[in-house]
Amino acid sequence: MKNLLFIAVAALTIHTAAAQYKPDDKASSVQFTIGNLGFDVKGKFTGLQGSINFDEHQPANGNIDITIDAATVNTDNSLRDKHLQEDSYFDVKNYPRIHFVSAKITPAGKAGSYTMSGKLTIKNTTKDISFPFTATPGSNGLSFKGTFKINRKDFGVGGTSTISNELTVALDVVGVKG
């Protein structure tokens, strides 16, 4: 009887365990778009690290904990990129990482679509965010894609400036088993 109970508990644990993935920095992209003097400026970050625990059949059991190297900000303009690394923007000397940790993952209707809520930290300021995303199986893992908007001033980024307060962040994170 004890063996049967152990097998049942073990099977339940295996069934509810989320698969473990690591973000593949080279295959992933974290991009942003922000208005500046009437034009859209596009940029990206690299240096993606963290852990992704996800089961598409039981997303509530998953969690995502990701950091990005803030010093990797790249807008294809080296002078602007250096300026973005300074105190009034990302202050990468004092705040080298941008951090996101999920709090809740729920299905969003159609297969492969979900909503994620969590906490985004930039410059030691943490705000709740929520956004839709998709998870698509790939050759050796999953591709997670989502888009959300944030207000840069909520995180103390940029002060008064000619750039828009709101920016759009587009994620395409490839998680490889590991």
Image: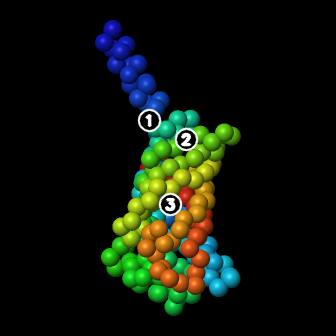
Q: Is residue 168 visible?
A: yes
Residue depicted at x 33% and y 14%: 3
Rendered location of residue 149, percent (x, y): 58, 63
Q: Amino acid at mark 2?
A: Thr
| Placement of 45 over or under 108, stated as above or below | below
Which residue is labeled 3 in the image?
Answer: 24
CA distance separating discs 1 and 3: 21 Å
Q: Nearer the viewer, mark 3 or mark 2?
A: 2
Tell me the residue at 58%/70% (across/down).
166
Going from N to C along the chain, the mark reached first, 3 or 2, is 3
Residue 22 in view: no
- Going by the numbered disc 3, the residue's amino acid type is Asp
- Distance from disc 1 to disc 2, alpha carbons, whole Å, reads 16 Å
Q: Earlier in the sequence, mark 1 or mark 3?
A: 1
Residue extending furthest bottom?
79
Give residue 106's mark. 2
Instruction: Check disc 1: other Cα within 10 Å, few if <14, some if 14-19, many if 20+.
Output: some
Residue for point 50% across, 82% down: 160
Q: Nearer the viewer, residue 41 or 44?
A: 41
Label 2, residues with CA under 10 Å away: few <14, some 14-19, many ≥20: some
Q: Are marks 1 and 2 in contact (CB under 8 Å)?
A: no
As helix, strand or loop, the secondary structure at mark 3 comes to loop
Q: Which residue is mark 1?
A: 17
| Left or right side of 151 for 50 | left
